[in-house]
Image (cartoon, rainbow, N blue to C red):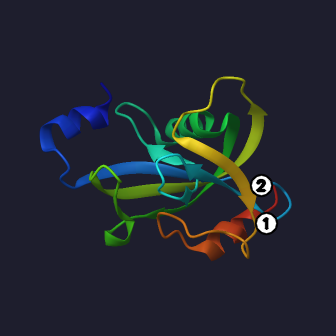
Amino acid sequence: MSYIQTLRAKVGHDLLLLPGVAAVIPDGKGRILLQEKSSGEGWSLPAGGIEPGETPEQAITREVLEETQLQVRTIQILGAFGGKEFRHVYPNGDAVEYTVILYLCSVAGHSHSPRDPETKSLRYFTESDMPALALPYPVELLFAAAGRPGS
């Protein structure tokens, strides 16, 4: 049983404050990678929770690999986000409020391991064709980071 499953067994659907990470992964053409969730939640940055004993950098590397099959290297932290705007209720009723460290990452390789079933599809988007995200990251920051050297 995962850490979150253990907590959920104790608190049910009540609000949990959770540390998380998210990745801005540009393609060198001014687009960023988004993940469409299988659960019907829509689109998001590749992201996930930090497990006990794991550093944020280890968490983003693991989460991106699981969700996208991409091996990434972190370039820099773009910011930390949280508060009421980062509350989310999942389709099963679980309520969370995330405190998220946002990383700019670059692709270092590909994995042939199976992709996590929570990913329905992956696609690169420009700022003008980007769908709404599940969490309100500042879009200007996401695309400014995508155009930085080394990204």
* Circles 1, 2 touching at the beta carbon (< 8 Å): yes
Question: Residue 151's mark?
Answer: 2
Q: In which quarter of the image is the C terminus?
A: bottom right
For the view shown, which residue lies furthest in the right direction?
29
Percent from the top left, x then y, of residue 35? 61, 51
User: Measuring 37% from the left and 30% from the top, which residue is drawn there?
Assistant: 53
Q: Quadrant of the N terminus?
A: top left
**Image quarter for residue 140?**
bottom right
The residue tagged 1 is 147
| On screen, residue 18 above or below 127 | above
Q: Which amino acid, mark 1? A: Gly
Q: Which amino acid, mark 2? A: Ser
User: Measuring 77% from the left and 37% from the top, which residue is drawn there?
Assistant: 108
Frontmost residue, 139 versus 11: 11
Separation of marks 1 and 2 at Cα, in angstroms: 7 Å
Relative to 92, 35 lies left or right: right
Question: Residue 139's mark?
Answer: none
Percent from the top left, x then y, of residue 41? 47, 56
User: Measuring 62% from the left and 68% from the top, which residue is drawn there?
Assistant: 131
Percent from the top left, x then y, of residue 73? 69, 40
**Image quarter for residue 50?**
top left
Q: Residues within 10 Å of mark 1 (few under 14, many from 20)?
A: some
Q: Is mark 1 on a helix, strand or loop?
A: loop
Percent from the top left, x then y, of residue 87? 33, 64
Frontmost residue, 115 versus 83: 115
Q: How crowded is mark 2: few (under 14 residues within 10 Å), some or many (20 or more)?
A: many
| On screen, residue 62 above or below 34 | above
